[in-house]
Image: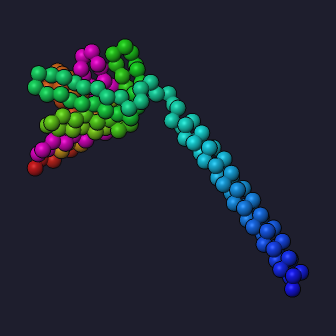
Amino acid sequence: MNFFLYINKNLIFFFGLIIILAFLLVIFTKQINLNNIELKILDKKLSNVDISEPKFTINNDDKKIYITAKEGNFLSKDKILLKNSVSFKSNEFSIETEKVIFDRNKQTAQSKSKSLFKSKNTTIFSDGFNIHDRGNKIIFYGSSFIVLK
């Protein structure tokens, strides 16, 4: 009877040891995989972007137009190419598009990509727009579709 209990203790000990080693092996391989994934994510984030999450404002006498994007590249001292989820917002309207050239000095913006303008009673889909006169005038280009409420 003592011999039978002695064998079970050794089997239980070795079985437990194998389970613990397997558990540690799984934990270390998962940690290594997580580190590799984090490095890949960092590599993808590093691109040819001069400005990450740029924010600008067009100021005029009556209102402010806030401009945000996910990426920006300097084209010259004052001109910046804003890309990916570019948004113009004021108290009266919002414009969403993918690419805009913003001139910080002249306070103008131009886009030749599909754009969506929204205000309280108007929605405009266009192939581009031009904001000039410090945000007082907006001209829509190309095929435009206007919805009036």
Count of numbered badges drawn on the protein: 0
In percent of the image, x 51 and y 35: which residue is there?
45
In percent of the image, x 82 and y 77: which residue is there?
8
Is 112 covered by the magenta stretch? yes
The image's colouring method is: rainbow
Q: Quadrant of residue 136?
A: top left
> On the rendered structure, is 60 left or right of 36?
left
Q: State the residue lying farthest toward the bottom.
A: 1
Q: Nearer the viewer, residue 84 or 144?
A: 84
Q: Nearer the viewer, residue 13 or 86?
A: 13
Is 30 covered by the magenta stretch? no
Residue 76 point in image, percent of width and height = 39, 15
Q: Is residue 24 above or below residue 41?
A: below
Q: Quadrant of residue 112?
A: top left
Residue 72 point in image, percent of width and height = 40, 27
In percent of the image, x 55 and y 37: which residue is there?
42
Q: Nearer the viewer, residue 124 or 90?
A: 90
> On the rendered structure, is 72 left or right of 14?
left
Q: Which residues are magenta?
A: 101-122
Is residue 111 visible to us here?
no
Q: Quadrant of residue 125?
A: top left
